[in-house]
Image (cartoon, rainbow, N blue to C red):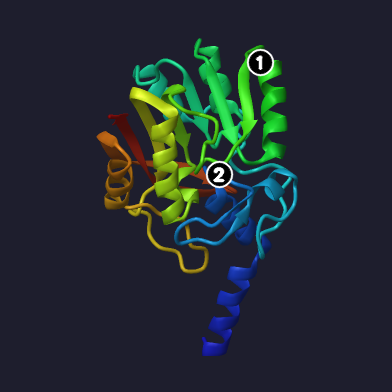
């Protein structure tokens, strides 16, 4: 086969709409933006509020009728944290997005606050909480500042938001979460792991173990558990494998 023919086939495969859509959904999966426009470390900026409005969140990324992480159910890691007994007291779901994790925890009897900087997402979250018959306090708030919250929470749940922040944002977030919690509070966090292979065509935000230890430790969080977890999921008929850090830390 000629070199030109090989290049043509490779270009056609990269540009195939089905492959592009699958790549977009896979890359965005599990991400709930901390702000309307976020630039993850190692990634490209995404306007998450635009995504929730059904508009394109970034150049080259098509609009989607439904965010790829919208399973209308709590994430497996949040269920595991709850069943493991790690959730306690007043709970903050930080970067709560469409609210399914917060609603699940409220159903377990916890007083839950869900914060996000996407007003559009919170409209849906409030509706879902009402439909579920539970009370969750939702509010538009910058996760790197958490203004108005001091000594307010005993557990912070972060399911896929930490990796959406740049390095300075991560440090501000860790410090803000420390200020917003009470002594002995627990931080439960999941984020993309650097064990995921790099993808030059569509870079994914990654977080190293050292970054987690430096950022959280520097903000007054003692890491008690830090484990990589790999899940496999079918996306548009293709099996996708991704690795996440599951972190449990205690405030001192």
Is 99 left or right of 227, judged from the image as shown? Answer: right
The residue pinned by badge 2 equals 34
* Res 188 → quadrant: top left
Q: Residue at x 40, y 41 (%)?
A: 174
Along the line of sight, the residue nearer the viewer: 111 or 181: 181
Specify few, some or many for label 1: CA neighbours under 10 Å numbering under 14, 14-19, or 20 or more: some
Is 85 left or right of 40, judged from the image as shown? Answer: left
What is the tally of numbered marks visible in this picture?
2
Give residue 119's position: percent from left, percent from top. Answer: 70, 38
**Res. 223 in view:** yes
Is 128 left or right of 233, judged from the image as shown? Answer: right
**Res. 73 in view:** no
Give residue 167's position: percent from left, percent from top. Answer: 41, 55
Q: If the image is split into quadrants, where does the C terminus sit?
A: top left
Q: Residue at x 39, y 17 (%)?
A: 83
Along the line of sight, the residue nearer the viewer: 179 or 191: 179
Q: Residue at x 61, y 22 (%)?
A: 137
Q: Residue at x 60, y 81 (%)?
A: 8
The residue pinned by badge 1 equals 132
Give residue 81's position: percent from left, percent from top. Answer: 39, 24
Specify few, some or many for label 2: CA neighbours under 10 Å numbering under 14, 14-19, or 20 or more: many
Along the line of sight, the residue nearer the viewer: 212 or 79: 212
Q: Which label's residue is closer to the chain start, 1 or 2?
A: 2
Give residue 59's position: percent from left, percent from top. Answer: 67, 64
Residue 59 lies, with reference to residue 191, above or below; the image says below
Q: Secondary structure at mark 1?
A: helix
CA gap between label 1 and label 2 equals 24 Å
């Amino acid at each position: 086969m000629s070199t030109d023919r090989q290049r043509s086939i490779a270009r056609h495969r990269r540009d195939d709409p089905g492959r592009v859509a699958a790549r977009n959904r896979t890359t965005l999966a599990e991400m709930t933006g901390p702000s309307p426009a976020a630039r993850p470390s190692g990634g490209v900026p995404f306007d998450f509020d635009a995504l929730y409005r059904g508009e394109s969140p970034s150049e080259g990324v098509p609009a989607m009728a439904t965010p790829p992480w919208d399973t209308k159910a709590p994430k497996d890691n949040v269920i595991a944290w709850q069943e493991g007994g790690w959730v306690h007291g007043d709970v903050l779901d930080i970067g709560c997005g469409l609210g399914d994790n917060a609603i699940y925890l409220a159903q377990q009897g916890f007083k839950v606050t869900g914060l996000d900087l996407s007003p559009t997402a919170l409209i849906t979250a409030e509706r879902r909480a009402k439909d579920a018959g539970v009370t969750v306090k939702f509010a538009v708030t910058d996760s790197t500042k958490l203004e108005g919250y001091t000594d307010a929470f005993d557990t912070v749940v972060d399911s896929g938001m930490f990796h959406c922040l740049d390095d300075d944002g991560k440090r501000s977030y860790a410090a803000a979460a420390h200020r917003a919690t009470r002594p002995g509070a627990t931080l439960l966090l999941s984020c993309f792991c650097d064990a995921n292979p790099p993808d030059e065509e569509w870079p994914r935000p990654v977080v190293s173990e050292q970054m987690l230890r430096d950022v959280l430790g520097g903000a007054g969080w003692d890491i008690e558990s830090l484990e990589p977890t790999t899940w496999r999921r079918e996306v548009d008929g293709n099996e996708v494998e991704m690795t996440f850090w599951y972190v449990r830390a205690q405030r001192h």
